[in-house]
Amino acid sequence: MAIDSSVAYNLHNKYILASVGRVTWLKDYETFIKSIAIVKKEIPDVVGLIVGGVREDKSDYYQSLKKLTTDLGIENSIIFTGSQTKISEIYFLSDIVVNASLKMGNVGRTIVEALALNTPVIATTYDGLNNIVIDDVNGAIINVKDKEGLAQKIIKVKNQNFNSIIDTIPKEFTLDSMVENTVRVYTELCKDK
């Protein structure tokens, strides 16, 4: 099933936070869910989309996330969409994309894709990374497993006006750069023949 519009999940007039990726503990959906419970006190119309499939060996983890939403009383504010084919629609209809991953940091494809649709991103990072997400420029940086920090950043980003988020994407992530690099590889290979 794919999301055709905000109507599919009754998202009209909601403040939409999306986290995209397969359902696994590495994505730290617990922190995402717990932060939404905190944010809901200030932004009552907040809705969190968890967009990703659940492998059979992750079904217990998925059920624990569902239970967490119930325990926190926000089961109607968290939507597990399953795998989706129209990810660009999700980025476009989202007010913020959140990547709370425990390992990857903030150089993932989902981050670049969201920024390309002018959607601010809140993401984790690690020492030594050349971050794509920059505080107060195109989103915010968070620490891993920090539900309070994530909640504060969500509220802060909601109240900011960002200009031309797409322009903050480094050149190496643009289509032109990828085409140039591909042509360069083919040119080098043809020279060797």
Image: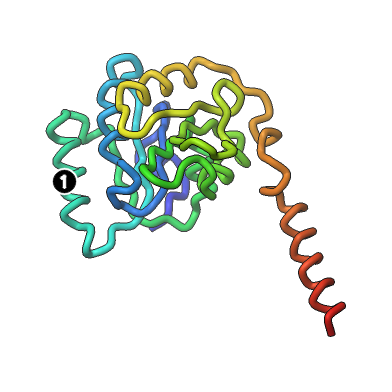
Tell which residue pokes out farthest to the front in this image: 128
Q: Name the residue under label 1.
A: 64
The amino acid marked with disc number 1 is Ser
- Residue at 51% x, 33% y is 121
Camera-side residue: 161 or 61?
61
Numbered marks: total: 1
Where in the figure is residue 183, as x and y percent of width and height? 80, 66
x then y, percent, for residue 186? 79, 72
Question: Compared to 62, does 70 lie above or below?
Answer: above
Q: Residues within 10 Å of mark 1 (few under 14, many from 20)?
A: few
Outermost residue on the bottom side: it is: 193
Residue 137 on image: x %, y %: 61, 24
Residue visible at 50% across and 40% down in the picture: 106
Relative to residue 180, is residue 89 drawn left or right?
Answer: left
Residue sitting at x 28%, y 37%: 78
Task: Please give left or right for residue 102 compared with residue 167 in the image.
Answer: left
Q: In which quarter of the image is the C terminus?
A: bottom right
In depth, the one of 113 and 28 nearer the eye is 28
Please tell me whether mark 1 sits on a helix, a strand or a loop: helix
What residue lies at 84% left-to-right and 71% top-to-bottom?
187
Relative height, residue 39 to residue 131 (above, below): above
Which color scheme did the rendering employ for the protein? rainbow
- In this image, 188 relative to 140: left or right? right
Image-quadrant location for residue 92: top right
x, y percent for residue 114:
55, 41
Q: Please state if 61 lies on the left or on the right of 162 as rendered.
A: left
- Quadrant where the N terminus lies? bottom left
